[in-house]
Image: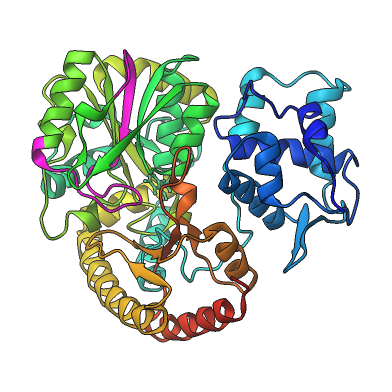
Amino acid sequence: MYYNVKNILFNYGFGPKQEYSNIYMNLYNALVKAIVNRDLVENGKLPPSRVLAKDLKISRSTVIKAYDILILEKYIYSVPGSGCFVASPKDKKIRINLNAQTEQGNYPRISKRGVSFIRNIQPIKTGNMGIAFRPGLPPLDIFPVQQWQQLSNDYWKTIRSSELSYSNTFGLECLRENISNYLKIYRNINCDAEQIIITTGSLHSLFLIGNALINKKDGVVIENPTYPHAYSLFNSLRAKIFSTHIDEEGISVASIKCQNPKLVYTTPSNQYPSGIKMSMKRRMELLKWANKENTFIVEDDYDHEFSNWEKPLTSIYGLDGQERVIYLGTFNKLLHPSIRMGYMIVPYYLLDAIRALYEQSSRFVPPSMQKTLSTFIERDYLNKHLRKVIETSILRKQMFVQHFEDKFANRFILESNPLGLHIIAKDRQPFSDILTSSILAKKGITAHPFSNYFIGNSLSSGLVMGYASVNEKIIKKKLEMMHRVLDAAPR
Ligand SMILES: Cc1ncc(COP(=O)(O)O)c(C=O)c1O
């Protein structure tokens, strides 16, 4: 016996007028509300995915995706061979309060913008912060801690009390100058230091850009698959998203089906997460198209140090002569994510808006960190570190690929992406990668579900995994463990 949940779900907002960009999120949210409000009680059985899909006239994979997230977040549990059941509601108090605020009106109403951000927050949190094999991490263990500490000590030894006061929001002059020089040498980019704005990273930059540019229903073109936080952000801002398929040369303007787009978000050096490098021809076509359509291009060059190492291609920013491109760079990938420093190069036209938003939302990145980084660049330590990082990453990648193929050749195909800091292991047979990811997370292994990077229906399943931060000895051990865990898991 299982619940007939169709009417309950409609009562909780699941219906033809979708408020969410993804149907599975709509279903997920309706089920969460039904569970926290006790319409679905502990240990009650949910309908099988096939039955619910038929009842709601949606695809079975959509139901499976929603169930997977609910399992991950412990709203429901699965019993192999029997189905899914409602879990104990304990530990879910935060969500109950959230519902009380948004729906019962016991408190001042949250703004539409706030609700939109809540609804579009990334659905998947593995709850596991383990380093092996979290994508996007550089070799953390070779970061020159002592060198950094020395520079930081130097800063504090010579500090004047006036430097402890408020600082320029957009970044220290010396750091912006050094980044401008660094970009000239390493990326062949010419820009004025005053166009550079220091942020806590690319996501921070993107947030400022989105808020400066996007009104509700503005067209935003995004590659599919993409960086999930970028998609969530533009959705939260209630942009009209046009996802664009990419082929082996990157975005093709012919495939962009959007009238009057406000901006295009792209990762041309190393398409995230597919690893495709946009060809020069496509870069030029995109720029020409952006000029014709009066659109901005947001070029997220999040890991150019890695992806341009062997065969550097001029950035779209470098090709641009008409201030069409906003360029995002970050040190959180090359150095380490906890350093929280990145930058953007902003066209003069947008500078005032971005600056105003920044000044009214936060102050500045700590000057001690900025000054230390500035000296780190100036003394060429960054260059030396970069070389070591590349060397180590290449070595670790070789080890990862070798051991992974040894263990998982029957189950996954590794995408042979020569760039970047992650690798995609595609399922040979379609499978719930969300479930695989959650099973691994419980054992302390991080592997992000590939399907989670797609806009709308996922076109593929697999695992997105990082290798560069994992020490050579640990790679093999962790992959062996992963093999044991997946072997024992039901398929
Ligand atoms: C494509 C892409 N852009 C931006 C970022 C964010 O970088 P940051 O840590 O500097 O905010 C990431 C992080 O994973 C990313 O993958």
The C terminus lies in which quarter of the figure? Answer: bottom right
Q: From what the image shows, is residue 45 above or below residue 343?
A: below
Magenta segment: 257-281
Q: Quadrant of the N terminus?
A: bottom right
Question: How many badges with numbers are in the image?
Answer: 0
Horizontal side of 268 relative to 407 (left or right) equals left
Whether residue 475 is in magenta: the answer is: no
Question: Which secondary structure type mostly characterizes the magenta part of the structure?
Answer: loop
* Apparent side of residue 231 relative to residue 196 in the rendered image (left or right): right
Residue 190 visible in this rendered orientation of the protein = no
Q: Position of residue 483 (x, y in %)?
A: 50, 81
In front here: 342 or 100? 100
Q: Where residue 490 appears, x then y in whole percent? A: 63, 73
Residue 439's place in the image compared with 241, above or below, is below
Of the pair 474 and 190, the residue shown nearer to us: 474
Q: Which residue: 56% across, 35% down?
A: 22
Residue at (39%, 43%) from the top-left corner? 226
Q: Quadrant of residue 354?
A: top left
User: At which x and y percent is residue 10?
Assistant: 77, 28
The front one of 234 and 205 is 234
Q: Is residue 36 above or below residue 125?
A: above
The part of the image, by quadrant, that contains residue 137 is: bottom left
Indicate the quadrant where residue 193 lies. top left
Residue at position x 11%, y 31% in the image? 284
Image x and y of residue 299, in percent: 27, 35
Q: Is residue 332 visible?
A: yes
Tell me the colour scheme of the image: rainbow
Q: Residue at x 85, y 30 (%)?
A: 100
**Residue 275 highlighted magenta (yes or no):** yes
* In this rendering, position of residue 117 left or right of residue 45: left
Q: Nearer the viewer, residue 399 or 199?
A: 399
Q: Is 97 displayed left or right of 80 in the figure?
A: right
